[in-house]
Structures are given as structure tokens and as C-alpha cells.
Image (spheres, rainbow, N blue to C red):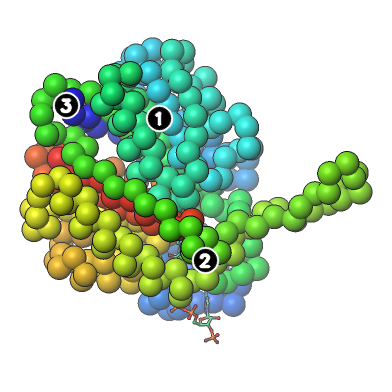
Amino acid sequence: MKSVEIISMGRYVPERIVTNNDLAKIVDTSDEWITTRTGIKERRIAADEEKTSDMAIKASQEAIIRGQFDPQEIDLIIVATTTADSAFPAMACLVQQAIGAKKAATFDIAAACSGFLYALTTAKQFLVSGMYKNALVVAADKMSKVMDWNDRATCVLFGDGAAAYLIQTTDKPNVGIVSDFMLGLGEYSDYMQIIAEEIKPLEQKNIMVRNPYVVMKGPELFKVAVNSMAEAVDIAAKKAGITLDQIACVIPHQANDRIIQAVAKKLGAPKEKVFVNIEKYGNMSAASVAIALYEAVESGAVKKGDYVALVVFGAGLVSAANIIKW
Ligand code: ACO
């Protein structure tokens, strides 16, 4: 069977940095509460006119330039997002247009914070089957536009960002994305939702409606998150035919540092093997693990030949894990 390798990557985060102290000026919270409960110190918030697609495009452009890759060679673009500029067109079409990938098929995937790994695994299937050779997988979320900025329990947790990866088939055996795992746990679908007022069909009166916003059952999510992420890594490692101690770096979804540490404990992974960047960004939904992988590679936490475990959970609930031989 063919293998699928990551051949290039890009990342984009907005310039605006919002610290915990900045948030304490708009909701009843404190740097001390946010830091001790979550590990977050600051997050990036997109400029008002900066859209999810703008971030997705900038990350994609970096991946293409870095990989010195001809966009005409891209067969497939998948964007993982739940904060698209609008329900349609797909963000993948906007990325395609901006980068000039004229021959690519394009669609989006909605799997909340698990979106990047769902998109990566989906793209991989098109490549392994032989249908396509090159794909661009993008994760982009502008969580700031779906926040209730009066709700201190949610608005302190999230941020905005994007990352993009070019992946390609290779005849080398057992390299690149060596195993995949995805699971839906629909029974927990009410733990985290974006809710919106319904507009009544054929009625023109309800023009003023509130923007959709996130509601969350934080403590309930916490428990399911820990169990589902630890289990996902375990299953993905078994599918890859490796033991947990062969994994050089675990890169988990960055929702809460306490969740990350609890997952690490369950896996028996020492602190230095677990990559954390939540303090700089908060939870950027689909983009979180994608940006964390980029930064883990850049910082030298992931080296050539290392086994890396990517693991996520998100609203749905949906969880996923991939083992990558870097
Ligand atoms: N500042 C100060 N106090 C706060 C804040 C805040 N920002 N938010 C909540 N509180 C208060 C609550 O009102 C509560 O007060 P009370 O005891 O007087 O009622 C108290 O702090 C404790 O609240 P808890 O919700 O019990 O706090 P907990 O320790 O569980 O931490 C948190 C909350 C951080 C949300 C945690 O439960 C968590 O991280 N859960 C998982 C969230 C998550 O992973 N979300 C995303 C997953 S899916 C995805 O990423 C798309």
C-alpha cells in the first residue's frame, strides 16, 4: 500500500494579542483564574475585517512557498472549519482561487476541534486509493466571531488561527501518516453547541437576530475529553503497530492544559514528550492541533524519523488520532 507524507506546512495567526488582563476589563474574570483553570495567558483575535478565509489563505500560501510547490499540481483541497465566512461557498473554493490551484477538487469538513485530523484522514484516503497524488489540508477557525462576549465561562477560552499542510503519496513503505482513528460520540452532542435564533420561513419581520454563539457544559466536557483522547492515542498506536513509549511527541488538542496533563498521565507520557502551546493561543478549534504540530516541528520537539501522536476531541463529540512518522 502507498504511504502519504506531509511535504510542507504553513501557519497564520492574527496580529492582535489579547491577554487575560485585557479580558478582565470586559468580563468578571482574572488572569489568575484563567491561568490556573486553563493554562491560557493570551490569545490571537482576528481584526474585525479579517475573515476565516483570509487566515486559511495565508497559511496555505506559506505551505506552498515553503514547499516550492506548484499549486497547479494540487488535486484536492479540504478546509476544516466550523466558522466559515458563510455556509457557502466552501472555504476550500476561496483558498483554491487565492492560490491558483485550478485543477483541485474542493470541499470543507465540519468536525469542530477535531476537524484537522478528520480532514487529514479523509484526504489521505483519496491519496492511498490512487485517485489523487497531492492534497492541501487546511484548518482555520475564527472562534472570536461565535463567542458570547458576555459569557466569561466561554469567551476566555478561545482564539483565532489557521494552518495548512501539503500531503503527497510516496512509494516508501510505513512513512508519513501511518495510522488513523476517528470516532463520533453523538450522545454528548449537547455538551458544546453553537446556537442560533431561527428565522421563520416566509416572514420578513425577524430581520434582527442575534449572531450564533457557543454554549458549553465545561466540566462535563472535561471528563469525556480526557477519556476519549487517551483512548484515541492508544488505538492509533496499536493500529500503527507501535507501543506508547515509542512515541517521541504527543501533540494534543489545546483546549485546556489540565485536560492535556490528565491525558498525558493516562498515557504514562512524561511532560517533556507532550507539546503545549495553549498559553499563547487558547483554543483555536480545528486550527489548534495543526498549529501545534507546526510549532513542535519548528521548535525541534519533533525531529525527522520521530513517531508523533496527534490527538483531538471536539464538539459533537468527535475524537480522532493519527500517528505520523515525521
Ligand atoms: N473567570 C472567573 N470565574 C469563572 C470563569 C472565568 N472566566 N468562568 C467560570 N467561572 C466560575 C464559575 O462561574 C464557577 O463559579 P461558582 O462556583 O460560583 O458557580 C467557578 O468559576 C467554577 O466553574 P467550573 O465550570 O466548575 O470550573 P472548572 O474548573 O470546571 O473550569 C473550564 C471550567 C475551564 C471550562 C473547564 O471545565 C474546561 O476546560 N472544560 C473543558 C472545556 C473544553 O474543553 N471546551 C472545548 C472543547 S470542544 C472544542 O474545543 C470545540
Near-viewer residue (104 or 241): 241
- Return the x and y of residue 111 as percentages of the image width and height: 46, 47
Residue at position x 86%, y 50% in the image? 206
| Label 1 element class | helix
- Return the x and y of residue 90 as percentages of the image width and height: 56, 31
Residue at position x 35%, y 44% in the image? 117
Query: Which amino acid type corresponds to the residue marked 3 in the rendered image?
Result: Met
For disc 1, the neighbor class at 10 Å (few under 14, some 14 to 19, many from 20) is: many
Q: Nearer the viewer, mark 2 or mark 1?
A: 2
Query: Which amino acid type corresponds to the residue marked 2 in the rendered image?
Result: Tyr
Label 2 near ligand 1 (CB < 8 Å): yes
Q: Which residue is mark 3?
A: 1
- Return the x and y of residue 241 as percentages of the image width and height: 10, 47
Pointer 3 or 1: first along the chain = 3
Give the number of the disc on residue 197. none
The C terminus sits in image quarter: top left
Near-viewer residue (165 or 198): 198
Question: Is the C-beta separation of discs 3 and 1 under 8 Å?
Answer: no
Q: Which residue is mark 2?
A: 191
The N terminus sits in image quarter: top left
Q: Which residue is mark 1?
A: 60
| Label 2 element class | helix
Specify whether 9 is left or right of 138.
Answer: left
Q: CA distance from mark 3 to mark 1?
A: 28 Å
Query: Which amino acid type corresponds to the residue marked 1 in the rendered image?
Result: Ser
Q: Nearer the viewer, mark 3 or mark 1?
A: 3
- Return the x and y of residue 269 as percentages of the image width and height: 15, 64
Q: CA distance from mark 2 to mark 1?
A: 32 Å
Residue 313 placement: quadrant: bottom left
